[in-house]
Every structure is written in structure tokens, then in C-alpha cells.
Amino acid sequence: MQHVSAVREPLVTGGKTYHDVTQDVCRQVEAKPNVRWMAALSVALFLFGVFLYSVYRTLWYGIGEWGLNKTVGWAWDITNFVWWVGIGHAGTLISAVLLLFRQKWRTSINRAAEAMTIFAVICAAMFPVLHMGRPWLAFWVLPFQNTFGSLWVNFNSPLLWDVFAISTYFSVSLVFWYTGLIPDFATIRDRAKGPIARRAYALLSFGWTGSAKHWSRYETVSLILAGVSTPLVLSVHTIVSMDFATSVVPGWHTTIFPPYFVAGAIFSGFAMVLTLMLITRVVFKLEDYITLEHIALMNKIMMITGSIVGVAYITEFFIAWYSQVEFEQYAFINRATGPYWWAYWSMMTCNVITPQLVWIRKVRYSIPLTFLLSIIVNIGMWFERFVIIVTSLHRDYLPSSWAMFSPTRIDVGIYLGTIGLFFTLFLLFAKFFPVINMAEVKSVLKYGVDNGPTYVGGHDHHAPVQHAATPGVPASAPVNYNKHD
Amino acid sequence: MQESPKYWKGIEELENSPEFVKNALTEFADFLPVKETYGSSDESVAPRRDFLKLMGFGIAAATLASCQTPIKKAIPYLNKPEEVDPGIANFYASSYFNGTDYNSILVKTREGRPIKLEGNPGSPITGGGLSARAQASVLSLYDGGRLQHFTIKGQKAETARVDQEIRTKLAGATGRIAIVSPTIISPTTKKVIAEFAARYPNTEHVMYDANSSSALLRANGGVVPAYDFSKADVIVSLGADFLGTWLSPIEYARQYITNRKVSSDKRTMSRHFQFEPTMSLTGANADVRVAVKPSEMGAVAAALYNGIVGGGSSSFKNEQLNKAVAELKAHRGRSLVVSGSNDVAVQTVVTAINQALGNVGTTVDTDNPSFVRQGDDARFLRLVNDMNAGTVGAVIFYHANPAYNHPLADKVRSGIAKVPMSISLNDRLDETGSLCYYACPDHNFLESWNDYEPRRGALSLAQPTISPLFATRQAQDSLLKWAGNQQSYYNYLRANWRGVLGGNFQANWDKAVHDGVAVGSLTPAVQPQLGSTITIDQALSKIASAPKQTGIELSLYEKVGVGPGYGADANNPWLQELPDPVSKATWGNYLAVPRTMAVAAENKWEQGDVVRITTANGQSVELPILIQPGQAQGSVSVAIGYGREKAGRVGDKLGANVYPLAVAADNAISYVTSVTKIEKTGANSQIAQTQTHHTIMDRKPVVQEATLDEYAKNPKKVTEYDKVATPEGLEDPRKVSLWQDYEYKNHHWGMVIDLNSCIGCGSCVIGCQIENNVAVVGKQEVINRREMHWLRIDRYYSSDHHKDEFETEGKLATYRAMEDPSDNPSVIFQPMLCQHCNHAPCETVCPVLATTHSSEGLNQMTYNRCVGTRYCANNCPYKVRRFNWFSYYSNEKFETVNGHMFTDLGRMVLNPDVTVRARGVMEKCSFCVQRIQLAKLEAKKQKRRPKDGEVVTACAQSCPTQAIVFGDLLDPESQVHKITQREHGERGFHVIDSINTQSNITYLTKIRNTEESRNA
């Protein structure tokens, strides 16, 4: 047990009862899909179709279908890879780090954030495979016993570290996410009307009965997994950054990359969580669970990580100057003023300047502005990776090889396609899985009910519930916590 | 009861038991159980299981039968030809000459197929060097665009019938019979033609050159003097691109560089002045280059002459010219002036200058002249007129294509139509051949016997290295046959050589065939054929009286790769994709314009803008713009050899044909004309350049140069060595490393590239491409920056702006300014290939260990293991790794440009020792590991170590100037070891040493013989 100040605002508004929570969350799962969901899924599936077509072209004809060339060997592929991996980070941060730090407000967003992590990692994992010239041999990057003789993988290569980092990350995230889902699956199972649904959710819930032993193990596993995941938040993007940092390419060869990438990952991840949450809460009417307070808190994290990233950008320039290395200096001058200046300044505007608006309280609590900001940050973070990869490669050591990169339709198709894949998965998740962790939300709800004062005011469609006064808090001193409504 | 038989087969028959009798008629003792099993009865043992078994077997059998791997038959020799061992290459000496440059060659054959040409080190003319054009010509042997049989009016015809008809018609021809050819330097071929002329007495042999040197011949009594650039301390060239395309570039390059190489033994070099309108390969190598409008070339020559002999005046004033005069005067007898002009007056002046300087006999040899140009423009012009006038009865085109490569192509075409009988001996139905009634295609030179005499006294032989691939016949055999001589050309050739070889003929002949070259002359003492020369005074007054040009002038030039478009060169994808040494453009021609003209307010041309250029003779073509640094103000230039209609699938419709823009007047062709109009068409056609950034950005660690003065004064100061900062102060980067050094116990292969010797000709690029089966990717893919060349030549122009302006102008502005080349830049070439780093950045990043370090210092690429992440290419500071973006051997997009990898015919040229790389894998220079391996095995068989010089990479082999030296760094006797030791601390440096890649290639700083230092 922990003590929470009485004046702290409730994490769930609208005076929800346990039953309300179950109702609100299970409604989407049990009801027929609504039109908006169908429309969204159609768009996502269309984009996924674009993805399949682009992948077909890539696999059938070769990487030449992309815009890469002899000088720029990676561009949109690895940009997208890093972007998606980065997006995934918020989920892990919310579910693991915030769990360890006992940040209870995470409960209503962690489920969706974790799902986002998993889908983002799936999207990200497409690229290391697709960008290979011979993806059908991708399994060669795994250190397995083989009959090729003494062939083994190269443990010096950061790409190999990536293989381990991403696969570990994906497995741990998946297990963590699924563990959290089990009690909620059981709830749905218990409510399910149709035989198929009952059977399916019964399978998914692994025979959960809700006994004290189950809960105890659930808590233990969650804590252990949180402990395992927490270093992953730092390690995955650290290792991704080493793809660049350990190279000799000016603009890549930078020791600041690990912290800079991790901050950037959390930054972009929170932006994506916000984008998704803001849509979900409206589409599924979950405004009482994902409150403005949540949005404001996430905005703050975004602003802080955005500022860290901004400092990193400036530090890079300082180090380039301080190093007195000609190639390094030129790489950064070229980044800001060369042919790709527009990419650099898009990045700076989106990632460093716009998040500073969050200092203004009104912006922080404004849903449309937050939504806009989250999109801007996602664009900015995509540009950050593009800037790092392409502007460093396109003009490196030998001016004779300097070249420009321009994407083809297939490049664009694969990128949009992974967005389609992501949203297809996310929409299916949102429809068939509980988007909010009912069990954990109930735990914060309980707290509010037990210790909170009488609830006054309310929401349109929920009758205010009067609770018995808790000892120590005079019932005659009602406080309206719902001031933002 | 039957009687027992008298004879029986066994006891059973003898006994003849009832059971035996019963079974005697049935062969099998019992019925197979099948029927029983498959009977309708229900009690059958296991019908379902058996059914499944049978079905399984049936499906498996049907599946196996249907999936048949394509059968590729490798047929072994039933009777192994002598000397041909499968897997072992044979080399045969031969010669290459197709009307442009002469090269003595060694033909490498594998299992009877020529697969590569190499320079013949025994040749007194070309040494071991070989031009890019000659290198690439091996592909023309397997060119599917060749005409594969005789034709009549384009239809296949029996050889005998064609012969019959031709002989009848020749006998009955009214009017002259003309044989039209480019320069022929084969004495025996000339004899054949003479015999033909003897049989048909009204025969005339007319030679013309697509890139004519008539004026040079006229000014030198009908011959091209033999030049010796190696003896010249001062060289002045007036527009002669003698290192690239002029007369005999490989020969001249070899001589030129002899006096340009510097080392601790020789700290002097020749000084080279170049006056020219467009930046040629030669101009790019000059110490002093002055951009001159084409019309001023005469004035430059006159000014030089006046300066040297004193007196007179010229309209051309230039400080550099005065210096050139002074230097020439100071080096009488040790200097050389040459001109590429086709103006008799200019050439006369140049001849006079050489005479005045006393160069005749030292650097200019008229006694043993060169025969590589004999074309007479005037005679050909007369022939064209006669053809149109109807006085020509028959015309035979022997490797000549005037319907394309002559300014009066229109008149040639109409003329051919008026000639009763026209025969083409060309190897394809080209622009001329397709107009001819008969086509009797000649063999490829690799299928032919022939002899050559490029210079008086220097004979050379060509021998067939493969049986004729098609139903073609050697042109000389055709001519002999038509002349009624039934002898084969081979016997004819031998007979003709009896005189010169003498003594024990067979032994001498065998030696000559083996060596490819011989001493002696088969050419009769020169009869000056060309019109009388004008006197020097006439020449000077003609130059002085020439009208002053004020408008834009156009000069036509020849490309190092495709050349004037002779024979099969235009249809050769290797040549089309060979970047122009200076502009780095491939696949087509363009209008080279100076920057000032492009940016002028009235023009505002961007690179790639298509303009329509109209010349004084009313002809016009559309061409894209290329802004060419070094292009003379007020002048533009275009390459000839493009805009083909009937060259073949590869060569057709590339660029524009500018031959019509040349002027055929005054009995000579002028490649210089004035422009009346250049207007934008609004279209844009991107030029496929392999390099789009042109300046070095003052990156000394990449490429270094110094002046001769600096070098002579303090050779230890000419090269800057990078240092890295450590806590102990500045340190040699090699001393600071994360990695453990490799230990080399046996060999350590390395290379030295002398930037002072490299002229940038591109011979090595093609040599490497052939040796290593490097794919051709075509124009669009070059535009996409995906050319596959393992070895490229980086070309950097100097800029007017340097780092020392950082303080005054600011860094940003200076860097921006440094991107722009000077208007008349100095140029440096740098061959760039895999540096085989000992601490290779590529090796550490490959996740699957597909690129690794060998125990002999090679950076190896294992194609089979590569999964294609391209990480290695990103991490390569030299950007020498090439990725297979597509299946270049099966993707239909490349069927035209890379056709030789698609057909059985074309695939014969592939080097069987080198894999054709699959789609999705990385490839790069291997230091010709197959050659290393071969030499090691040869040495091993003889129980010894490989000697220096036994391992020669393809690039080093083909280099006409020996700029590339390859060998074992551990062998104290090796050249490469000696040079690296000698030049250590002087000129030797490694590219971007500061990142400590510890490359195995040492570059030697370029030394310029200029007065002012271009160093920032």
C-alpha cells in the first residue's frame, strides 16, 4: 500500500464504478464494429495493400526498385526502421519504468502503449529484413549451428547486436503485454455470449480464475518483466544508435548517440502514444480514463525529451567544431546548409522548437493542439533519422562520390505501407482486445473510491455516484476534482 | 502319357511332372497380388493404405518428372586440341587497329574463346599499354549486331552466288571502281587492293578518316611524322589531344610519361603547354593550359612561330604564350610542338616551328614516319561528287561508313543510290552497309590474319584466335577472290612476309607470330600522295587574313571511349559506359559550354537543358548542355561518334550526330565552325555522369599535389601527413588503434598508384570491367548513380576558392564557393578502387562475415555469404563498393545494355575465373585475386616463390603509363616494396590516413611543373 495525498486528483474521472469500467472497456469488444472503425480499417488495409505491392516489387526485382545508390546505401529503409523502433519505446517506458516508479496514472494508457510497442517493433523489424539484398537468407544473421563449415556471425557488427536487441525487445514486450492481458481476457470470457468468443477468449486467458494465487503471480511476473524491460528501454535504442556510432562516417561516428537516440525514441514514442490515445479516447468514448491530466503529463515528458534531443543536436555541432576534424565539421555544416538543409531545419522546427509550446498550460491541456503537436513531433523524428542517415552519407570523405538521394514510389509505398500495417494491427487490437487494462484501472479506481471524497458534478451519461464518506475526510467538504470537464 | 523328351533343359522337364506341365506355359509362377488386393471384395487386406501408397508414389513420381532443372550441356573435347587445356588460359600475340589507334595486343583465350586483350609488352610502339577502345573491342567479337552472313539487298544470300554476281558485275562495270576505307596500315592488305586494282584497272582506293588529319599529312609531305614525346622537355600542343585521341595516344602517352615520372633519381620533368578550346584529356594533364577559341588557334601558331624565329606579329597575345616561346627557345632540339588542327596553314606553321627549333631528328622523325593516318579528304570529296555524277561503276566500302561519319553523309547516300553496284565489307548493316546492294561482312579482327605497319620499320601481325563465329569472310579473301586469286589471305600474307623475314622463313615467321611484332618494313618508300604543301609565308598570310570571328564557335572533338564511331565501337556497351575522362559523362554526347555562357542573362542554361544549335552551314542538332570548366569563352564543343541510326541495339539513338555540322570545304574537313544560333527547346535531358561533384574541397588527405619547384627543393615537404590528437600530443594515426594488427607471414599484396603518371585515360577501368565481369547498367542507372565499375578514376577540378578564405569570407560562404570549379581549372585524376585496408571499416560491420581479411592482406568479398545489408558500402570511406541492385544478367531492363550476359554468344566473353554476381550482393575490387592465385600456383608447381611481376592486376596490366604497380610488399625485391620504401615520407601517402584504415594502396603525390603553386 502507498499513501496518496487526498488532494491529488483522481486518475479516472466520471465517478466510475468497477462495473462501469468493465462495461466501458468491454463494450467495444462485444459490440458490432462501428462505422468509424470500419472506415479506419479500410484505409489501413488499403495502405497495407500498398505495402504488399511494394514488397513484391522489392523482392521480385531487387533493391534497385528503391532510390538508393552507390553513395547512399541506406535511406528510407533504415530511417523507417529507427523511427518505428523509437516509437515503440514509449510503450515499454510507460509499462515498465512507470510501473517501477509507481506512477499509477499509467494504468489507463499502458495497454494501448504496449500494443503500440509491439506493432511498432513488427513494423520496424520489416526493414532490416527487407533492406537486405537477399532477404531469403536473413536467417544467416542468426548464430546457429550450420553445415556451412566454420561459418559464424560477426560479433563485431552492430547489425548483429541489433538482431539480438530487437528480438529480445520484441519477445519481452510481447510477454509483458500478454501477461497484462490475461485477467482482462478472463473478464471478457466470462461475459462472452457467443460460443466462439467464449472459446477464443478462454484460450487467450490461459485458464485465469482470478484466485489470490493468480493475482499474486500476476503481480510478481509483472514486476519481474518490468525489471527486465527497463534496461531494454535504454539498451535497444542504444544499440540501434551504435549502427551509426561505431562507423567511420562523419556525422555518424559520434559518442553522444546512445543517450541522444534513447531520448529521441521516448520523445517520438510519446508523440505516437498521444496520437493514438487521442483518437482512441474519442472513438471508444474513453474520455474518463484517458483524461486531460494524462495528456498534460505525456506532453511534459515529450517536452523534456524533446529538449534533451535539442541539446544533443547542438552538442553535435559543438563537438564537430571542437574536434577540429575537417570531415566532421563539413558534415555538420552540410547538414544545416547543404542540399538537404530543408530536412535539417524541418527536424529542428518539429523536434526542438514546437515542443517548447508545451510550457504554455493552455497548449498542454488542449486536445487539438496536442494532437497537432504529436503529429509534428512524429514528422520531426522521422526527419531526424533521415537527416542523420542521408545527409551524412551523401557527402562523406571523397567528393567524387558525393550524390543525392531521391526516393522512388516503392520507397514511399513501403513506408506508407508499414503505417498501414501498424494501423491494421492496432485497429484489430482495439476492436478485439481490451484497450484499457481493466484490472489495473480498477486498482486506481478503488483508491479513488475508498479515499476520495464524495464525488460531485459529473459526466453527461453517468449518474454521479455518492460514496460513503471515508473516515478522516469530512463528507461535508466535497471537492470537485472534475474541474477540467 | 507323353513320351519323355530326348533332350531336356532340366530335371523338371525330364521328369515332366503334372505340376510342371501345368506351369510350363505360364511365365510367372503366380499372379501378382495386386489384382487380389484391388478386387472389389471387401476382405482385401489394406486397399486404403495401398491406395495411398500408390497415390503417393504416383504424385511423387509425377512431381519429380515435371520439375526438371534446365540442362546446360558442357561438352568435353573428344579430341583435345593441342595446347588447349580446360581451365588454363592461352595467350596469343596479335594487333588491333580499326582506323583509330594502333595497339599491339596479347589475346587471352580460354577453351578457344578470346576473353580479354592485354597490352603486348614486346611492342616498340605501345609497350604493354592498351587503350580502352582496344580493350573493349573483344566484346565486339561477340556482338549480336554483327552481320552473320552475306546479303543481297539485306536478304540472306549464298556466298557463292554473291561472289558470282559480284565478279560478273565488276567485270562489266562501266566507270570507275572505288574502294573506300579508313586508313589502312596493313601493307599486305594494300597489296591485295593493288592486286584487285590490277585485275580491274580502273579501280581507285580512297582512304578518308572520320576524324581527319589530312592537313597534318599535307604539311608533312604526305606522312605523319613519328613523334617522340619522351625526348621533349617542353611540349606545346595546339589542340592536339595526343593522350586521348590524337593519332596514336597509347604510344604518345607512354613516351610522354617517361619524361614526367619523378623520383629520388630524377627530380625533373617536362613542361607541357596546352592551347585548346575544350578541356581534353591532354589539356587536363597539361602544366599550363590556355583556353583558346578554335578560330584563334592559327594566331597562336603564328605567334609561336614569330616568337621563335623573331619578327612578324600575331593578333594573339598571352603571357603564357610568351613563356612557352621562351621555354621552347631554351630547349631547341628538346622540345615538340604539335597541333590537332585540320587546317593546312596551321599545320604548316607547326611543322615550320619544329624545324626552326631543330626538333626534326630528335622529337620529330620524318624518315620513319607513322602511317596511322592516311586519309585524304580531297580525294574522298571528289569521289562523292563523282558518285553523284554517275561516273562511278562500283563502290566497295571496306570498314568505311561515310553515310554516317562524313559531313556530306547526305551526298554519300544519294551517291550510293546512283552507283550501279555497291558492296559493303563492313561487319554490320550500318548506315552505309544497309544502303549497299551486297554485304559481304568481314571477319572480326580476332578471327583474322593480318599484318600492320603503324610506323616504318615496326611490323606487327594479327592472328586468328577463334574460328569464325558466323558465315563471314575476311575482306582480303573477298577481294582476292574477286580479283581471281584463289590463294587464301593467310598464304598471301606469308608470301608477302617472305621478303622481310628472309633466312629461315618458317622459324622467323613462327617467332613473328609468337611475338606479334617484327622489325622491317613492307611499305614501299613513301610516295607523297597529297597535294603540295603551302609555304610557311603563305600559311602565315592565310592565318593573318582569316576573318576575325566574333560569334560563338563550335569545335567537334573525338571521345576517348566511343571515338569517331567506327565499326563496332558505338555498339559496345563497355565503351558507352566508360566515363569521359574529363566530364565523366556516359551514354551520349552533349554541348560543352563555358560557365560564363551558361549563366549569361540571355541564356540562363542549366546543365541538362536541351538546346538547338544551328551552325553557319544551316545544319542544326538538339543537345543537352554540360557546363564544362576550361571551355574557352565564346566557344562550345560537341563530340562526334554519337547519334547512330544503325550501329546496333546498344549504340543507336544515343546523343546526336554532329558530323553534318563539320564543314567539308577547301578540300578538307574542318571540325570548327561558327554558330549562328543556340536556343533553348524547353526540354531537359539529364546527362549520365558518374561524378557530379567536381572539386576536391581542399581535402588534402584525399589527393595531394605539389609543384616541381617545391619537390626539387624539399621532397620531404610536398606531402602532408595527417596527425591525430592524443593525450601525448599529435601522433601518427597508425599508432592509435583499437584493433590488433594482422600478421603477414607469406605475402602482403599492395599497390602503388603514381598520381603523376596517371593521365586518366580510363584504360584500367575497361580492363577491370572485362577481367572481372563487371555489369553494364545503362544510362538511367548511371543517372541513378549505380554504375558498377570496380575501379573508377576520380577527376577533380581546382577551385578559385580555398580554405584560407575561412577567416575573411566565413566558412559557409567559402565552402559554398569551393564547390564551384575555376573557369580554367587545373585537373587531377585519381584512380580509386578498393584500398584493401588492413583495418577495414567494411570488415567490422558485416553481420555475416561476408567480407573478411585474408592472410595476405586482401580484403575479400564472399559473394555467397553476402546477404546485402550494404552496411559495408556505407562504412567505406572510399565508396568503392558496388551493390547488385538488380539481376543484371536476367532482368529485361538490362537486356540491351548488358546483353552479353544474356545470350550464349555474349557470355563467351565472360571470364570463367570470376563469378557473375547475383542480385543483392555487394561486390568490389579483389586485387584480381584470381590472377594472384594463378601466379602462386604456377610458382608452386615449379617449387619456388612467385617472382615480382608475375602477379599483375588487370588495371596495372593495361595502364599505358605504368601508373599502377602491384606486388608483394613483403618481397624486398618487388617494385611495389621499393617504391613504397623510397617514397615513404616524400610522395607516398594513403588516402584519408587519419581514420587509420591502413590501406594497402600507396598514392604518390602529383607533381606539376608549374610556376605558381596551386596549393592552398
Image: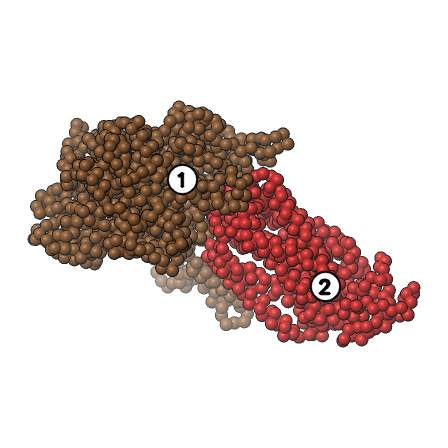
Chain colours: A red, B brown
Q: Quadrant of the C terminus of chain A?
A: bottom right
Q: Is residue A76 left or right of residue B241?
A: right
Count how many numbered circles sit on residues in the image.
2
**Which image quarter: residue B271?**
top left
Look at the picture and state if B992 lies above or below B661: above
* Element type at mark 2: helix
Residue A386 seen in this snapshot: no
Letter of the chain that mark 2 sits on in the rendering: A
Which residue in the protein does label 1 denote?
Answer: B827
Which residue in the protein does label 2 denote?
Answer: A362
**Which image quarter: residue B365?**
top left
Residue B309 seen in this snapshot: yes
Q: Amino acid at mark 2?
A: Lys
Distance between mark 2 and mark 1 Cα atoms: 62 Å
Task: Depth check: give the residue in front, A244 or B660.
Answer: B660
Q: Position of residue B177 (x, y in %)?
A: 12, 49
Task: Depth check: give the residue in front, B337 or B598.
Answer: B598
Task: Depth check: give the residue in front, A189 or B782.
Answer: B782
**Residue at (22, 33) in percent of width and height:** B352
Q: Are marks 2 and 1 in contact (CB under 8 Å)?
A: no
Q: Position of residue B871 (x, y in %)?
A: 54, 47
Look at the picture and state if B858 lies above or below B389: above
**Residue at (29, 54) in percent of width and height:** B676
